[in-house]
Image (tube, rainbow, N blue to C red):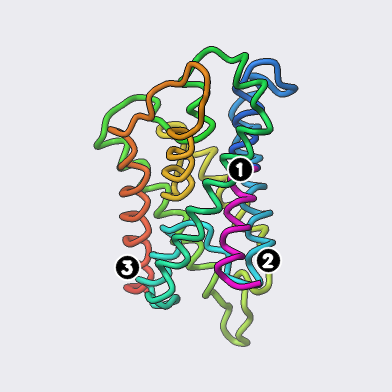
Amino acid sequence: MTPFIAEIIGTFLLLLLGGGVVANVVLEKTKSNDHGWMVITTAWGLAVFIGVSVAGPYSGAHLNPAVSIGLAVANKFDWALVPGYVLAQFIGAMLGALIVWMMYKDHFDVTKDGETKRAIFCTAPAIRNPLSNIFSEIVGTFVLVFVVLYFTGASILEPETPIGLGSLGALPVGFLVWGIGLSLGGTTGYAINPARDLGPRIIHTILPIKEKASNDWAYAWIPVVGPIIGAVLAALLMLAIS
């Protein structure tokens, strides 16, 4: 498997399971309708674990343009590889969102509220305030990328013992995203991933969804720009203290 294919598959699994849990909780007449935030955040954490487990051996399992950019800024990833990774992540995210819609189409059809249906594809703020919304995405992604950088490079000295992803596998990344969702996700829905938000938002635009809400393009830049800023800040801090 090539890194490009691995990033597509890993991000596809992330969005299939992450978008799937949102559909399962918010759409009408599902088995898990109205089961709440704990179910959603837990499943997103598990979705990250699964995506990283599959893609990790082949691509490093970035699954997120912000992670790829942050690693490149921190000199842990070749800038020349970033565009290919980002393209693969967007392809995987869009395919995952498409399959969620196909699987839950009957439930989309019986759900009347368009904003509820849009929430399966992309995020929206609980209170619309661009400054605080982008700050939320910056902080959430800062935590994500800073800790990922720690996972990928940390060790205990004397004797040197790796304690990053090489020895722990994908599990800590899943716990990391779960913790971010539980603690920091209540303001904007913690996109913390430009591909996760913009790719499915494009799919929402294309699909023939009944009683569809607007695509909220006025907000769409925030879950793209905010995560990139957060990732760069995390990388710069890691460079400063390493």
Cα gap from disc 1 to disc 2, whole angstroms: 17 Å
Residue reaching furthest to the right: 31
Of the 4 image quadrants, the one containing the N terminus is bottom right
Name which residue lies at 67% across and 21% down.
Answer: 106
Judging by the rendered image, the residue that carries numbered circle 2 is 169
Q: Which mark is residue 44?
A: 1
Q: Mark 1 or 2, which is nearer the eye? A: 1
Q: Nearer the viewer, residue 4 or 124?
A: 4
In reply to whether residue 11 is colored magenta, the answer given is yes
Q: Amino acid at mark 1?
A: Trp
Q: Which mark is residue 173?
A: none
Q: Position of residue 175 (x, y in %)?
A: 62, 51
Q: Amino acid at mark 2?
A: Gly
Q: Amino acid at mark 3?
A: Leu
Q: Quadrant of residue 223?
A: top left
Q: Position of residue 77 (x, y in %)?
A: 44, 75
In reply to whether residue 82 is colored magenta, the answer given is no
Cα gap from disc 3 to disc 1, whole angstroms: 27 Å
What element does badge 3 sit on?
helix
Mark 3 or 1, nearer chain start: 1
Q: Which mark is residue 236?
A: 3
| Start-end of magenta stretch | 1-16
Q: Nearer the viewer, residue 182 or 121?
A: 121
